[in-house]
Each structure stands twice: as structure tokens, then as C-alpha cells.
Image (tube, helix red, strand yellow):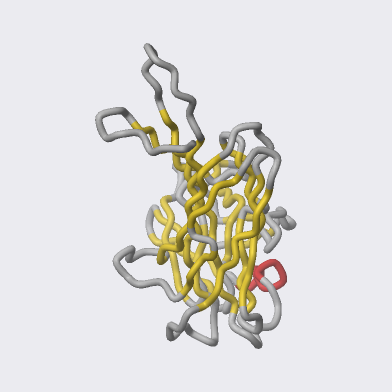
């Protein structure tokens, strides 16, 4: 029987973005919600022998107080060893833009079972996997990889500004200037701009790679600024 550890004991929360953490395997590094479909889904599996309690929810990209237009079913369930289940994400209203993608965060937390062992202090570790949930409105054509050449780069003093005129989120696997990777370059929203700190001795060229819908890494792209 699985129980949450009382508040008197320490509960450690580890936030990760990988596919497999502490036994629970999530079937993807991101989830693309096709606006023409009634729902989207992702698999979770438990290769361990012990069961897990799995809790899932969706958060907005920035303002966590904002109500999300998505619900997950089942939001809480037990996943026994060697078993798998499907998380279904369903849109429940919301006035989302129809000319560009919208980004949310899908959180999947796994809490392992513990065995009672008199005379020993027990530590329960809840592991949370956080992946992108990207809503893609019906009718959008193209893809981030196909359109990434439309990104424009411009130097602003010791910073680099990138503008994204497309309707797609550009999720960077890497952005490199003068042989140094820009650590704060994670992604850029559609029809918006972002500014990153330039390394010392930066030249006038940038190279980058995009992560596609399936978590794969695209080709190397280059541009001058």
C-alpha cells in the first residue's frame, strides 16, 4: 500500500526533463496537441517491480495562476510494476490564438511505494518530469525545422537579439557564437523576440540547431548578425 510520507519526514523533489527518471518512463520529450483532434496522448510505463503513484497536471508557460484550458485523464492513478498507462490531454475551452502555437508545461510526478520497516527511517523521493505541451492550431502549415531559416539575428551591444516571425515555437538544441554555446538560449515563442547574453570575443555569426516534434535534432543552421 502506498502512502505519502508525513510532513515530519523529508520529501525530496527532483525536477527533470529526461525520458526516464527513477523507474518511470515517459514516452516523449514533448507533446504536440493537434488542434484538429479532440485529444492528444502520451504513454507512461513502469519497468520496475514496485508500483508508483502517478500524478499529472498542466501549467501555463509563465503565469502559473492562470487557469489552463487542458485537463488530463487520469490525473492520479497507481501504476504497478511492468505496467503502462496512457495520459490523455483534452482541451476544455480557452481562447487560444489560431495563428500561432501556444506553449504549456505537462508535469508528471511519480511517487514510489515504500515498505514498512520498523527501526529504520524512510525517505520517499517524488520525481517530477516536466515536458513541453505545444498546442498547434488547425490549419498551420510547415514546421519549425522547415521555417527556422526565417529567424533574424541582430547584435545589441553585448547581447544577441533573435526575432521569430513564424507561427511555430523554435526549441533550440544549441545556439553557438564564437565556438561558445549560449546557455540561456532555450526557445523562442512565435511572432516574438528574445535576447541572449553574448560571450566575450563574439564575432558576427551564429549557428543553431532545432529540436523537432519528436525530440530529434535538426540540421545545423548559420546566419550573420
Left or right position of 170 against 124: right
Tell me the quadrant of the picture where the C terminus can be found: bottom right
Q: Can you tell which quarter of the image residue 125 is in?
A: top left
Image height of 41 relative to 191, above or below: above
The x, y position of residue 33, in whole percent, is 61, 72
Name the residue located 41 percent from the left edge and 51 percent from the top edge. 197
Image height of 169 relative to 118, above or below: below
Closest to the observer, 8 or 12: 8
Q: Is residue 35 visible?
A: yes
- State the residue lying farthest toward the left: 8
Q: Can you tell which quarter of the image residue 90 is in?
A: bottom right
The x, y position of residue 179, in whole percent, is 59, 42
Name the residue located 59 percent from the left edge and 43 percent from the top edge. 18
Q: Is residue 207 visible?
A: no
Closest to the observer, 151 or 53: 53
Image height of 110 relative to 107, above or below: above
Number of labels in the image equals 0
Name the residue located 61 percent from the left edge and 58 percent from the top edge. 30
Closest to the observer, 71 or 34: 71
The x, y position of residue 78, in whole percent, is 55, 47
The x, y position of residue 138, in whole percent, is 63, 85
Name the residue located 30 percent from the left edge and 28 percent from the top edge. 9
- State the residue lying farthest toward the right: 219
- State the residue lying farthest toward the top: 119
Amino acid at each position: 500500500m502506498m502512502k505519502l510520507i508525513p510532513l515530519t519526514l523529508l520529501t525530496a523533489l527532483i525536477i527533470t526533463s529526461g525520458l526516464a527518471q527513477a523507474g518511470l518512463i515517459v514516452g516523449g520529450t514533448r507533446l504536440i496537441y493537434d488542434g484538429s483532434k479532440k485529444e492528444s496522448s502520451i504513454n507512461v510505463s513502469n519497468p520496475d517491480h514496485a508500483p508508483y503513484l502517478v500524478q499529472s497536471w498542466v501549467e501555463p508557460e509563465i503565469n502559473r495562476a492562470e487557469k489552463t484550458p487542458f485537463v488530463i485523464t487520469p490525473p492520479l492513478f497507481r501504476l504497478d510494476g511492468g505496467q503502462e498507462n496512457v495520459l490523455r490531454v483534452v482541451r476544455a475551452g480557452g481562447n487560444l490564438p489560431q495563428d500561432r502555437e501556444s506553449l504549456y508545461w505537462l508535469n508528471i510526478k511519480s511517487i514510489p511505494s515504500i515498505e514498512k520497516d520498523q527501526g529504520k527511517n524512510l525517505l520517499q523521493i517524488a520525481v517530477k518530469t516536466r515536458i513541453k505541451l505545444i498546442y498547434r492550431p488547425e490549419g498551420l502549415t510547415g514546421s519549425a525545422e522547415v521555417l527556422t531559416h526565417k529567424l533574424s539575428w541582430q547584435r545589441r551591444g553585448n547581447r544577441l537579439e533573435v526575432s521569430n516571425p513564424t507561427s511555430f515555437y523554435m526549441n533550440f538544441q544549441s545556439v553557438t557564437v564564437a565556438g561558445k554555446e549560449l546557455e540561456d538560449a532555450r526557445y523562442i515563442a512565435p511572432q516574438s523576440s528574445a535576447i541572449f547574453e553574448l560571450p566575450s570575443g563574439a564575432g558576427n555569426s551564429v549557428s543553431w540547431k532545432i529540436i523537432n516534434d519528436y525530440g530529434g535534432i535538426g540540421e545545423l543552421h548559420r546566419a550573420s548578425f
